[in-house]
Image (spheres, rainbow, N blue to C red):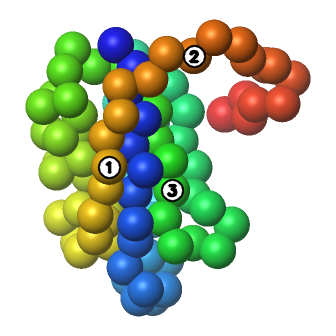
Amino acid sequence: MKVAAIIEYSTDSAVIARVRPAHREYLQGLKKNGNVAIAGPFLDDSGGILVYEAESTEQVEEFIRADPFFTEGVFKSWVLRPWKPVTCNPALLPTA
Protein backbone atom coordinates (compact mmCIF):
# COMPACT_ATOMS: atom_id res chain seq x y z
CA MET A 1 0.00 0.00 0.00
CA LYS A 2 1.06 3.57 -0.52
CA VAL A 3 1.49 5.75 2.55
CA ALA A 4 1.93 9.51 2.36
CA ALA A 5 4.09 11.05 5.07
CA ILE A 6 3.74 14.77 5.68
CA ILE A 7 6.85 15.67 7.64
CA GLU A 8 7.84 18.79 9.59
CA TYR A 9 11.56 19.66 9.71
CA SER A 10 13.74 21.34 12.28
CA THR A 11 14.35 25.04 11.67
CA ASP A 12 18.14 24.50 11.83
CA SER A 13 19.08 25.11 8.19
CA ALA A 14 22.74 24.24 8.81
CA VAL A 15 21.84 20.74 10.03
CA ILE A 16 19.41 20.27 7.14
CA ALA A 17 22.11 21.23 4.62
CA ARG A 18 24.73 19.03 6.29
CA VAL A 19 22.53 15.92 6.47
CA ARG A 20 20.64 16.31 3.18
CA PRO A 21 23.17 14.32 1.04
CA ALA A 22 22.93 11.30 3.38
CA HIS A 23 19.12 11.63 3.51
CA ARG A 24 18.89 11.65 -0.29
CA GLU A 25 21.24 8.68 -0.57
CA TYR A 26 19.03 6.81 1.91
CA LEU A 27 15.92 7.66 -0.14
CA GLN A 28 17.63 6.45 -3.33
CA GLY A 29 18.20 3.09 -1.63
CA LEU A 30 14.52 2.89 -0.65
CA LYS A 31 13.58 3.87 -4.21
CA LYS A 32 15.75 1.09 -5.67
CA ASN A 33 14.07 -1.38 -3.30
CA GLY A 34 10.62 -0.22 -4.42
CA ASN A 35 9.76 1.50 -1.13
CA VAL A 36 9.65 5.18 -2.21
CA ALA A 37 7.31 6.38 -4.94
CA ILE A 38 8.01 10.13 -4.78
CA ALA A 39 9.58 12.51 -2.29
CA GLY A 40 10.57 16.13 -1.94
CA PRO A 41 10.81 19.12 0.37
CA PHE A 42 8.47 22.07 0.58
CA LEU A 43 9.96 25.13 -1.13
CA ASP A 44 10.48 26.88 2.22
CA ASP A 45 12.34 23.81 3.63
CA SER A 46 9.88 23.58 6.54
CA GLY A 47 9.24 19.92 5.76
CA GLY A 48 8.38 17.60 2.94
CA ILE A 49 6.14 14.90 1.55
CA LEU A 50 7.28 11.35 0.99
CA VAL A 51 5.08 8.65 -0.49
CA TYR A 52 6.23 5.20 0.55
CA GLU A 53 5.26 1.76 -0.73
CA ALA A 54 4.97 -0.45 2.35
CA GLU A 55 3.08 -3.33 3.88
CA SER A 56 1.92 -1.20 6.83
CA THR A 57 2.21 2.20 8.48
CA GLU A 58 4.46 0.49 11.04
CA GLN A 59 6.92 -0.33 8.26
CA VAL A 60 6.85 3.33 7.16
CA GLU A 61 7.64 4.33 10.76
CA GLU A 62 10.69 2.05 10.54
CA PHE A 63 11.78 3.69 7.28
CA ILE A 64 11.40 7.16 8.82
CA ARG A 65 13.27 6.27 12.01
CA ALA A 66 16.19 4.83 9.97
CA ASP A 67 16.43 7.99 7.81
CA PRO A 68 19.46 10.23 8.51
CA PHE A 69 17.06 13.18 8.68
CA PHE A 70 15.45 11.48 11.70
CA THR A 71 18.63 10.22 13.36
CA GLU A 72 20.24 13.68 13.04
CA GLY A 73 17.20 15.54 14.35
CA VAL A 74 15.82 17.09 11.14
CA PHE A 75 12.47 15.26 11.22
CA LYS A 76 10.47 16.78 14.09
CA SER A 77 7.00 15.36 13.49
CA TRP A 78 4.98 13.59 10.82
CA VAL A 79 1.53 12.41 9.89
CA LEU A 80 1.06 9.15 7.99
CA ARG A 81 -1.92 8.64 5.73
CA PRO A 82 -2.59 5.53 3.62
CA TRP A 83 -3.03 6.92 0.11
CA LYS A 84 -4.69 5.77 -3.10
CA PRO A 85 -3.43 7.52 -6.23
CA VAL A 86 -6.06 7.68 -8.95
CA THR A 87 -4.39 9.79 -11.63
CA CYS A 88 -0.91 10.97 -12.56
CA ASN A 89 0.74 13.12 -15.18
CA PRO A 90 4.22 11.61 -15.63
CA ALA A 91 5.33 14.64 -17.69
CA LEU A 92 5.14 16.74 -14.53
CA LEU A 93 7.19 14.39 -12.36
CA PRO A 94 10.96 14.36 -11.92
CA THR A 95 12.87 11.60 -13.70
CA ALA A 96 15.61 11.12 -11.11
Q: Say which element carries label 3.
A: strand
Q: What residue is at 61 percent from the left and 62 percent from the top?
A: 42
Q: What residue is at 74 percent from the left and 34 percent from the top?
A: 94
Type of the residue with mark 1? Val
Q: Is residue 42 left or right of residue 87?
A: left
Percent x, y for residue 84? 49, 16
Percent x, y for residue 93? 76, 31
Q: Residue furthest right?
A: 91
Type of the residue with mark 2? Pro
Q: Say which element carries label 2.
A: loop
User: Disc 2 and disc 3: Cα gap in Å?
Assistant: 18 Å
Res 4 → quadrant: top left
* Mark 2 / mark 3, whichever is N-terminal: 3
Q: Which mark is residue 21?
A: none
Q: Which mark is residue 79?
A: 1
Mark 2 neighbour class, 10 Å CA radius: few under 14, some 14 to 19, many 20 or more: few
Asked if residue 31 can be seen in this view, the reply is: no
Q: Where is the N terminus found, in terms of image quarters?
A: top left
